[in-house]
Image: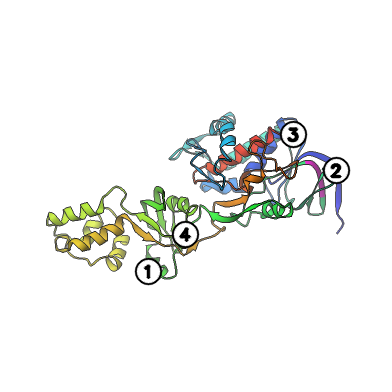
Amino acid sequence: MSISIDQSIQDVLIVGGGASGLMCAIHAGYGGHQVLVLEKGPKVGLKILVSGGGRCNFTNQRVDPNENFLSQNPHFCISALKRYPPERFIEMVESHGIDYHEKKLGQLFCDHNAKDIVTMLLTEAEWAGVDIRTGSEVSSIKKDADGIFFVTAGVQVHRARKVILASGGLSMPKIASDLAFRTANELGLEVVAPRAALVPLTWNSGDKESFVNLSGIALDANVSCGSVSFRENILFTHRGLSGPSMLQISSFWREGETIQINLLPEVDARSWLLDERVAGTKALLSTVLKKHLPNRLVEYMSEHWFVDQKVASCTHAELNDLALNLNAWPFRPGGTEGYRTAEVTLGGIATTEVSSKTFEVEKVPGFYAIGEALDVAGWLGGYNFQWAWASAYCCAVNL
């Protein structure tokens, strides 16, 4: 199969037609650059389309650059997020007449469909004169002695003066790419070891059988790992624990660590149960617990955590032990579900290799990296999209 080398030289070639790639292309085009986007999939914006249950949690109004992002250099993302705050992207959304709402905690979702965001980006890209080619999977990026990049996609070799790596991370393997990591290694760039984040945690082998009947139970809980805690729903599944709180804490959890789960975040379980005992409550302990907890969960507890008897008959020690489990249940995961269900990748090209102002790789002039390709990952709730928009914009306006 013969290789065809494009005789024209692009001003800017962007690898990846996801959130950061499209955003960067738009602003580079508006900046007067000739822009080519190469996307390996059959269409652009695939992760946008499946995000937020199909409604795309496109940003978060409460973005705090100092708190909501993880990186070996937590200060790296601050500049870009301040230069392109959520309000800027919201202005674009509103200018296209897209209806949206705040679901909770500053999270903004489309009222109708995630396609609205992709359509908006494609419209802006068309206005900016961007050339987008799908079905173009990039396999290598090389730079010659004259400073021209040669980007191979299938049997086509494209040439460009500047190349922007916006190929994302490893989450959602069916549409993900490891190109960022391969390219970084080829160029001699430091890479922070990747791992799945914002991902469900699994039962360890000893727990799986006893918890299987709890699948489908959801409840409000406070989940902690070390000094970090999140309070939202947790969801019992046949594989382990999911839900917003568990996804959040998964970014901080490491193998072998124990997570503390407060199943009654509004209740001091020890005081409550001892008060019931002092009052001489004749109801069974399970009956009392069902006032605050799902029936099936209480039934599990009665088999594994306590002897079901009248509250008034319980000893002080028995109620203390139960209260400790209710307010600080120690959960030791067996692992995570991995990249298959992860929403983002922790790790990536080390931020020490990249300018926080321009996103240019300092060792390779003319080569840039943005979005999830970098060692920056946000919390659940629109933060990763905001990082995509912000890093892309700041890169584009500094080309």
The amino acid pointed to by label 3 is Gly
The reply to whether callout 1 and callout 2 are in contact (CB within 8 Å) is no
- Residue at the disc numbered 2: 146
State the SS at label 1.
helix
- Residue at the disc numbered 4: 201
Magenta residues span 157-161
Give the foreground label among 4 and 3: 4
Residue 163 can be seen in this image: yes
Identified at 21% across, 52% down, the residue is: 272
Identified at 51% across, 60% down, the residue is: 337
Give the foreground label among 1 and 4: 4
Report the Cα–Cα distance between label 1 and label 4. Answer: 16 Å
Task: Check the image and name the residue furthest to the left.
Answer: 280
Q: Compare marks 1 and 3 and give the one earlier in the sequence.
A: 3
Q: Position of residue 298 (x, y in %)?
A: 29, 61
Q: Compare marks 1 and 4 and give the one earlier in the sequence.
A: 4
Depth check: give the residue in front, 50 or 314: 314
Depth check: give the residue in front, 90 or 362: 362
Q: Quadrant of the C terminus?
A: top right
Above or below, 240 against 266 in this view is: below
Depth check: give the residue in front, 154 or 122: 154
Q: Compare marks 2 and 4 and give the one earlier in the sequence.
A: 2
Q: Compare marks 3 and 2 and give the one earlier in the sequence.
A: 3
